[in-house]
Amino acid sequence: MPKKSVREMKPFELNHYSLSGRMFRLVIILVAVIGIAAATFGFYLYNNSVMREFRRQSWNISRTVRYYIMQNDVQSVARKVLDIYESIDPSDDVKSNNTYLAQFASVKDDKFESYKSSMLNIAEGNGAYAIYYGAIDKYTNRSVYLLDSDKHEGTYREPGYFDLIRTDTEIDEFYAYVHGSVPTKTDVALGLDESIPAYISNDPEYGYMCTGASVVNEDDRYIYMAFVDLDMNKVIHGNRIFMMQYLALLALTTLLVAFLITRRLDKTVIKPINQLTEAADGYSKDRQNNQFGTTHFDKLDIRTGDEIENLSLTMKDMEADIGEYIQDLTKATAEKQRINTELDVAREIQSGMIPHTFPAFPDRLEFGMYASMEPAREVGGDFYDYFLIDDNHLALMIADVTGKGVPAALFMMSSKTMLETTALKGSLSPAAILKQVNDEICKNNPTNMFVTVWLGILEISTGIMTCANGGHEYPAIRRGGGAFEIFKDPHGTMLGCFEDSEFTDYEINLEPGDTIFQYTDGATDTVNNDEEFFGMDRLVEALNKVPDNSPQEIINEIRYSLDEFADGAPRFDDLTMICLQYFEAKEFRALFYQDEMTVEADYKNWEKVRNVIEKNLSKTDCTLRDFNKIIISAEEIFTNICKFAYTPETGKVTVRISIYKHPMTAYISLIDGGVPFNPLDKPDPDVTLPAEDRIIGGLGIFLVKKLMDNVTYRRIGDMNELTLEKRIN
């Protein structure tokens, strides 16, 4: 329609865009489409039937010719032609050469002409284009003409002329002559699956023909066949007449059906709709003038006995109810505004209970963290929290309450308060905290709501995080510069389900650079417009899009990936995420003691090194067991440096002893300027093998790795540095 209202249209536009005009055009198009489809299908069946009939007719005529050939001595003429053909043994390119064809002149005697005349009579009597007798040379893949009764100058072939059978089409054609053509799918569907030895082709040399064939005889070299050509141009002419008659009938039928249907629709559909339109227009004008009379639709007398009559009755009821509805709507709008105001206050209260300041602990350089929460409604049931229990323990939690809206928000605030209060006691493990809070919730939970909780307490000085999972999602962990992977931790039940439920503590040993990411199911359950879930695989892929991201960058990347995936689809669940990155704690722990000495790389100096290590360890509560492990390991590394680092020359060895508190840990670093060598690259020996079968070497560094908590190597400029780490018990 044009971009103007009905009131702005002129009479001819109203008529053109009217429902009756559109309906008339639609009916014409519909009937025409159905008619064309029927004509196409009918023409296909008609054409298929005609083609099949032509193939059958050509085959039947070829059988008559075959009978004639077998009853007369035509084979003697054929043998003369083939004797000359075999004696010449022509090449493929001489088939129409006059010199070559002249050698067959001797076979065209009176008998030859008599047979040719008889076959011509058969052709004319049966309406065939041409009849000819030929032989298929199996040795050379040729079709040799023996006797052709064709009276047409352009397609007549002299005896001895041959066609090549080379292409796939030619091979298929002659296969059909010998074994019968493959029935079409339509023939099979109609039960006409008889194989007829005939082939229809449109050859530039011979024209559009249907050729039927019958095998007369066969020997080792030749298949003798009677061929009959029927001119298929008759089919084209017949099809043209059929289509012209059918299309003329279709056009008349279309106009007649369209006229009858349109008249019927005008009476039963269009006129009642126009009456409803006029009533609706009057009703609209009354509303604009603040008049609420109910007489417009009540005056209608539509009796069509169908949905239109039901519509008029419905409109009458609507007119009577609309005034009351407007009054109710006014009240509901005012009530909604009041509720929205209260929800705004509730949202502010809920937001105020969750920490939003980042960096969370700017004076603590041992870790970095970030978190976010986006409710699906004004208020939600997800929450996160983090707080220091003491200087060495950081608590993180994330939770998801069942349901949405205000009830979930109230349950969330209650659960968060109980979890935080219990954790701050500092004497309970995460599993014990979840158990105690679960029992408290179960004692007074009339709404049968529950909450999934993941709780982790990080010992900052060691990187050991003790965790417990109450039916929450699996966390994702990235080790150092590696990729995020889902960590399938042990699960307990959701809090609020069953009293006296048990929960399991487990530990995650965070190394420097490790990152842990936790989330609610609002991330994995995000859906797009195709109703596909974001899922766990896409979440891990998004986490690993940019390596070495900070916690805030990681959460921002996840939020961006979720928005891109949803592509505007509404979110039905709260989305909450929290991310923690752990740094090397020893860099920020209090240094208890540090000492250093440099000696010549000679084993005679070992006692000096041992005395320095012993002097520093004596300032701690180091046990004799740990002391012996440290001395044995340091001596092994010192000895290797003396033997191999500077061979055949000598050099210096620096021994640095660093002892840190919280927890008390000794770091013994041995530094040399020898050739670059990382002993940790050597594979561990297989100690299960007999001594005589083991590869020589590697036992010393293997023993050191077993005795120490950690052994690290790094190349600093021209120096090798190997560090032994042992936590002093």
Image (tube, helix red, strand yellow):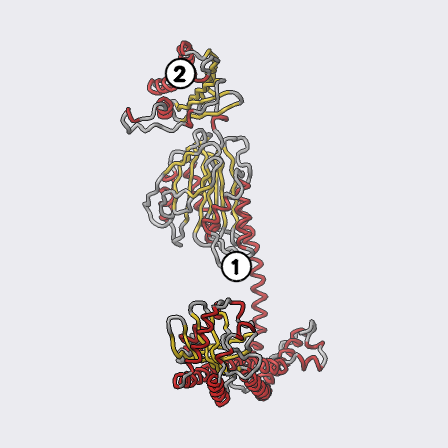
Give the image location of residue 106, x and y in percent: 49, 79
Q: Secondary structure at mark 2?
A: helix
Q: Secondary structure at mark 1?
A: loop
Q: Are marks 1 and 2 in contact (CB under 8 Å)?
A: no
Note whether 470 is above or below 675 in the view shown. Answer: below
Give the image location of residue 155, x and y in percent: 55, 79
Under mark 2, the amino acid is Thr
Instruction: Give the numbered dot on residue 622.
Output: none
User: Left or right: 268 with respect to 191?
Assistant: right
Badge 1 local density, few (<14 within 10 Å), some, or many (20+)? few
* Residue appearing at x 55%, y 50% in the figure: 345
Q: Please, which residue is most extreme toward the front here?
A: 106
Can residue 659 be seen here? The reply is yes
Q: CA distance from mark 1 to mark 2?
A: 68 Å
Quadrant for residue 609, please give it. Answer: top left
Q: What residue does disc 2 label?
A: 639
Tell how many labels: 2
Which residue is more in the foreground, 47 or 70? Answer: 70
Where the C terminus falls, by quadrant? top left
Precedes in sequence: disc 1 or disc 2: 1
Where the N terminus falls, by quadrant? bottom right
Note whether 78 is above or below 445 in the view shown. Answer: below
User: Left or right: 623 with respect to 723?
Assistant: left
Can residue 259 be seen here? The reply is no
Under mark 1, the amino acid is Asn
Q: Please, which residue is most extreme toward the left here?
A: 690
Q: From the image, state whether disc 1 or disc 2 is nearer to you.
A: 2
User: Left or right: 275 with respect to 227?
Assistant: right
Give the image location of residue 287, x and y in percent: 65, 74
Q: What residue does disc 1 label?
A: 529
Which residue is more in the foreground, 688 or 445? Answer: 688
